[in-house]
Every structure is written in structure tokens, then in C-alpha cells.
Image (cartoon, rainbow, N blue to C red):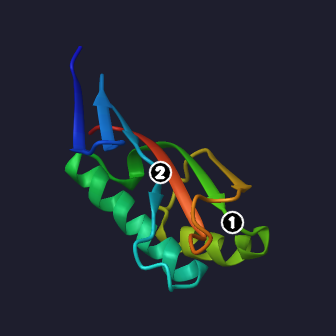
Amino acid sequence: MDIKRLHVGKTLSEAAIHNGTIYLAGQIAEETTQNIEGQTREVLGHVDRLLAEAGSDKTRILMCQIFISDVKDFNEMNMVWNEWVAAGNSPPRATVQAKLVRPELLVEMVVTAAQK
């Protein structure tokens, strides 16, 4: 079975597709001057875009891992998530506090989804 990779760089690919399953790299905000709500919206936009490119959408998410730099931001991040997630299709999810690679990053999400 072939593996298709999207947006391949020297260090990572933004997505890999194998046997009908899509694996996204950790998605982060590019505009890091935003607060947690803004960064979460931007990250979810990246997820939407990559899933569409891979032949899927947010209703097909199998699992999401969310890393936030400060647990105090959980409620605000979750508010944006709840506005975004498709009703009746909330995927299994884990959220943990983690020291992200750059201090201005507030949230990172890793998604696994099924193709349509």
C-alpha cells in the first residue's frame, strides 16, 4: 500500500495518508501574537484545510491530541473547539499541558482522520 505525503519538507510532512487514514502533523498558529482563542481558531483552520486536501473533513476525525502551554487557557480553547466541532461528531480527544517548542505558541493539535 502506498503512502501519500502532503507538503513534504526537510523535517516533516504536513500530512500522510495510508490505507484510508490521514495523519496530520502537529498544527500550530503562524500568527503567534494572538491569544489562545485566536491561535485555536487558526489551528482549526489549518486542520480543515489539510483534511479537505486529503479528501476528508472534521466529521471524519478519529482522534485529536491537543497540547496547550498553560492549563489556565483550557476553557477558552475548549470554547473555540466546541464552536468548531461538528455536532454529533465529537471525536475522542486528549488535552494536556505541555511546554511547546516556542514560548509564543499556546496550542498545538495532532489529528488522525478517515478519508471519505
Q: Position of residue 28 (x, y in %)?
A: 46, 63
Q: Residue at x 23, y 14 (%)?
A: 1
What is the residue that sits farthest to the right in this orientation? 72
Quarter occupied by the C terminus: top left
Label 1: few (<14), some or many (≥20) within 10 Å? Answer: many
Q: Is residue 41 left or right of residue 21?
A: right
Q: Residue at x 44, y 66 (%)?
A: 43
Residue 19 to residue 39: above or below: above
Which mark, residue 69?
1
Q: Disc 2 and disc 1: Cα gap in Å?
A: 14 Å
Residue in front for this viewpoint, 9 or 95: 9
Q: Position of residue 26 (x, y in %)?
A: 47, 51
Q: Look at label 1 and name its amino acid.
A: Ser
* Residue beneath disc 2: 26
Q: Residue at x 52, y 55 (%)?
A: 109
Q: Is residue 87 left or right of residue 92?
A: left
Residue in front for this viewpoint, 101 or 74: 101
What is the residue that sits farthest to the front in this orientation? 10
Residue 86 to residue 114: above or below: below
Q: How many marks?
A: 2
Provide the secondary structure element on which disc 2 rests: loop
Label 2: few (<14), some or many (≥20) within 10 Å? Answer: some
Q: Position of residue 14 (x, y in %)?
A: 33, 47
